[in-house]
Image (cartoon, rainbow, N blue to C red):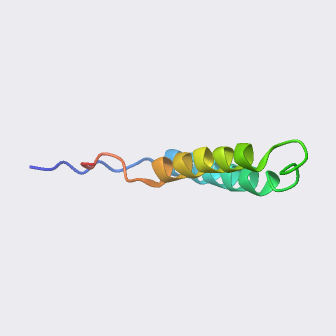
Amino acid sequence: MEMCIEIPGFLKSHDKKATESLHRFIGQLEGPRGTELTDKQAKALVKIAETLISSIEQPRGGSR
């Protein structure tokens, strides 16, 4: 039997703020790409940020 757990509203708003911040971070990486960061470094940071966004957006309490 699968149990469904409701996520409190304050956690949802924190998730939204976190994903918005990560999306802004990804956008800010374009400026230093090729100057302060190599393309490889920028791609690695984008991949990390995208992975974090995916994990935040995954439903909690369910099976994976």
Front-most of 24 and 9?
24
Front-most of 32 and 49?
32
**Is residue 9 at all visible to an observer of this figure?**
no
Q: Position of residue 3 (x, y in %)?
A: 19, 48
Q: Position of residue 62 (x, y in %)?
A: 27, 49
* Identity of the residue furthest to the left in this view: 1
The residue located at (88%, 42%) in the rendering is: 36
In the rendered view, does 42 fall on the left or right side of 49?
A: right
Q: Position of residue 51 (x, y in %)?
A: 52, 48
In the rendered view, does 25 fall on the left or right side of 57?
A: right
**Is residue 44 at all visible to an observer of this figure?**
yes
In the rendered view, does 19 fall on the left or right side of 37?
A: left
Front-most of 12 and 20?
20
Q: Position of residue 17 (x, y in %)?
A: 64, 50
The residue located at (62%, 47%) in the rendering is: 49
The residue located at (24%, 51%) in the rendering is: 4
The residue located at (59%, 54%) in the rendering is: 16
How many numbered markers are drawn? 0
- 4 above or below 36? below
* Identity of the residue furthest to the right in this view: 35
